[in-house]
Image: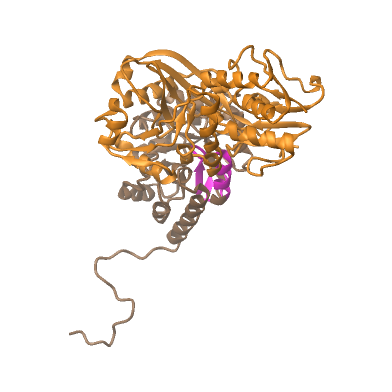
Amino acid sequence: MELYGVTVGSRLLLGTAQYPSPAILADAVRQSGAEIVTVSLRRESGNERNGQGFWSLVRDLGVRVLPNTAGCHTAREAITTAQMAREVFETNWIKLEVIGNHDTLQPDVFGLVEAARSLSADGFEVFPYTTEDLVVGERLLDAGCRVLMPWGAPIGSGRGLNNVYGLRMMRAHFPDVPLVVDAGIGLPSQAAQAMELGYDAILLNTAVARAGKPAQMAHAFAQAIAAGREAYIAEPMPMRDMASPSTPVLGMAML
Amino acid sequence: MHVTVVGAGVAGLTTALALAKGGAIVTVVEAGTSLGVNSCSRYAGGMLAPWCEAESAEPLVTRLGQEALAYWPAVHTATEQRGSLVLAPARDTPDLERFARRTTEHALLDADAIAALEPDLAGRFRTALFFSREGHLDPRAALISLAAAVTRQGVEIQFGTAFEMGTLAGGTVVDCRGFSATDRLRDLRGVKGEMLILRCPGVCLSRPVRLLHPRFPLYIVPRGDGIFMIGATMVESGERHRVTARSVVELLNAAYTLHPAFAEAEILEMGADARPAFPDNLPRVRSSGGVVSVNGLFRHGFLLSPALARRAADYILHGIQDPEVWDENPCQ
């Protein structure tokens, strides 16, 4: 998988928030095989200097950091946070979140497109957290995004893929754009389902961080995502309404 | 044996007390000009809740924390043991189920049982978890009692005295400086916590109440006389003392969710400080460069300091290392 020219082996991107401790986070990252982790600058800092303790632990994981703008409610806020993240983590990558509603944490797609355009023009490589809306996806590509990250369900809800039809449409509509399901995944089976639809990767956090045994859950997700990907490549059989015998019936009497 | 304990926060004073009771001649030096002004324990919740903490902490915290339940009533007679209550708004009941799965020593209460325990919460919550064996204390009052107990053992506490390694002549040095010890403990980090103190005579609670919250563990601890402490945020930051508007809103929302009368509460104080934590959020006794460190108590200062102090004293006085809290300095 290639994201902004970077070849990535693991199709699991892992968030770093809400773990019982940084040591457990490190263990989960190792077990997940993830090569990219997201870090929230805003909630984890206060200002640039004070979050160093946690950030240096994240950097020590030896994986690529994708800073995010979690908790930003306007394009302006998200842009400022992205600029701060570029300084702190020395990367042009930014996972762009512009939240539109406090309860559902759904993206404000208007603010998202605005911020994506501004950040792309400023040299950022933007990973937008969006909905499965095709037109919004097109606008984000116009704005300069080369990756789209639609939600499966609201952040932290663990509900899986709320709109399988919409996500399948999105895959068909953007055959050449890396698509990452971001948010709403609670179980490895849900991650596998998204991969079977042809999604390129899964970004998740709560499902691992809030599991009883985060490292073990991270490993379970890694296996499910690999299985889903392999199934997609292996071209699943079509679904049908009537049974179709798996052993030949030729020669048997049909009464 | 002469021992210098550096830091007069809850870790330093419990360690000083354990050493003095064990027969050492102890001096405590503290950079702050008076008791508690420079200690993050000043902003603690003061919950003695070893079983509740198992929701997010390792089993070691629950094991060691049980020592606090016997320790504090002896040092600070105003320590309360009325249990603690865990509640969730109706829409967050899956979080309550998760909390129950991850903890032990609790009973599931229905609305009537909640009303019997805390009449002011009658009719507001359908289910709760009750941890009957837990306790709570007022951290500032408890620190005064602890300092008095230390002084009664003949220990001198020198305030306004900065710690300079080279200038401390002879004897053993115990570094209990909490987050200030990052100069020697490179793997220590700060986790910022913000809290509020409210006066709300219209509400009466007898025990700490935890309200499950998707982002951080929120609790309201009654301090008596209509005073309540609300804590605490968890921010990966070594920043001290700055309280953000967002955190205040979140903390006040929690209070308001618990009881609408909190809307009329008077805000007496807003405070913040950085909790000292190692990467696994577990406490350590560590010996390096001739100095014994007691640190990493994280959000469990009053809960874990009795156990850590005892183990530090066992090492200093008798050479006994408890592997559960002992480690070698990974940065040397």
A155 or B307: nearer the viewer:
B307
Position of residue B76 measured from the top left corner of the image (x, y, whole percent): 52, 23
In the rendered image, which quarter is residue B154 located in?
A: top right
Q: Which chain does the brown colour mark?
A: A
Q: Is residue A35 left or right of residue B100?
A: right
Region of the chain picked out in magenta, as a range = A1-30
In the rendered image, which quarter is residue B61 located in?
A: top right
Q: Is residue B85 left or right of residue B290?
A: left
Does residue A30 lie above or below B90 as drawn?
A: below
Position of residue B78 measured from the top left corner of the image (x, y, whole percent): 47, 22
Does residue A80 lie above or below A203 as drawn?
A: above
Furthest toward the left, the residue is: A255
Q: Which chain does the orange colour mark?
A: B
Position of residue A234 measured from the top left corner of the image (x, y, whole percent): 44, 63
A212 or B5: nearer the viewer:
B5
B203 or A16: nearer the viewer:
B203
Q: Is residue A159 left or right of residue B51?
A: left
For residue A94, say whether it is visible.
yes
